[in-house]
Amino acid sequence: MLKLINSEIYRLIHKKSMYIYFGSTAVLYFLFVLIITNITNGYRAPSAVVNDANLFFGMLPVIAGGFFFSAIYTDDLNSKNLIALVGFGINKTKIVIAKFILMALSGIVICGFLPLFHYMAYAVNGCLGGINSIPALYMIAFRYFLHMLAYAAIAGIAVYGLQKKTFSMILYILLAAGLIGGVIEFMFFIIAKENASNYTSHFISNVINRIFTGIDGNGPPVMPVVEYIAYIIIAAAVSTAAFHQKEMEF
């Protein structure tokens, strides 16, 4: 499996479009920070560094996660790399796990870099949040890292089961943007009314919210963490089962 992960990492880091995409995104990010600081006459309260991160980092699952989901999962369907891996005799379960690990590693790199870039972008534009804001920025980034990872695992079921690039990509984006979860949650509130929260609290986005509520000291985070891990394991198991059932055309 390590050879597979290493080869996938090599393929990813030699992807020129990744550097163009994230380089362009970084420039736009910096320009946006420049604009909002100028709107406020060059002054933003130090707390804005963290407060604005809650908004900006919320786009992480769509913008960064969307690119990595495409590069790691759906690009294989166009290039027939998925078929080639199976043809070389690599176990399908190992492929599912390796892809998920690569998605996690990609997310770790982005979430390790983004808080520092965000902090420096504000500092350069005259808004210094103080050293204590950096841990808070990493916690916010970690929250959306968990979102990105969970949505990739869930949308991966479509990749391995249906092997339809466009459908899988749209499914991931809709999950990452919160549209699918929002619609289903709204339906539960209409149908179940006051009992809806008994069900919606177990949706993946709310499970992650409960994890961070616990981290903040407002409740035990153990059960939400268990639920989150269960989501990942179940999604991986379903992906593996669907992959094994799918006939590969060589």
Image (spheres, helix red, strand yellow):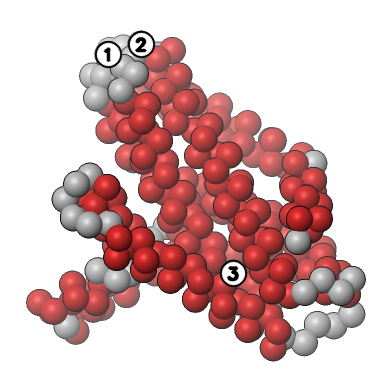
Amino acid of disc 2: Gly
User: Are dots 1 and 2 in contact, CB under 8 Å?
Assistant: yes
Residue 3 figure quarter: bottom right
Which image quadrant: the C terminus?
bottom right
Q: Whole-Å distance between the Cαs marked 3 and 1? A: 44 Å
Any part of residue 249 in sight: yes
The residue pinned by badge 1 equals: 43
Percent position of residue 144, x then y = 42, 49
Q: Is residue 240 left or right of residue 56?
A: right
Which residue shows up at 49% across the image and 67% down it?
232
Is 94 situated above or below 162? above
Front residue of 179/41: it is 179
Mark 1 and mark 2 lie on one chain; the one further toward the N terminus is 1
Q: Decide if residue 237 is on the left or right side of residue 54.
A: right
Residue found at x 39% / y 19%: 122
Q: Is residue 163 left or right of residue 110?
A: right
Q: Residues within 10 Å of mark 3 (few under 14, many from 20)?
A: many
Report the residue at 86% width, 74% height from top. Answer: 89
Q: Which residue bears the numbered disc 3?
A: 156
Judge whether 216 appears above or below 116 on screen.
below
102 or 59: nearer the eye? 102
Q: Quadrant of the N terminus?
A: bottom right
Kindly identify the amino acid type of the residue bearing the numbered disc 3: Gly
Q: Is residue 173 visible?
A: no
Q: Residues within 10 Å of mark 1 (few under 14, many from 20)?
A: some
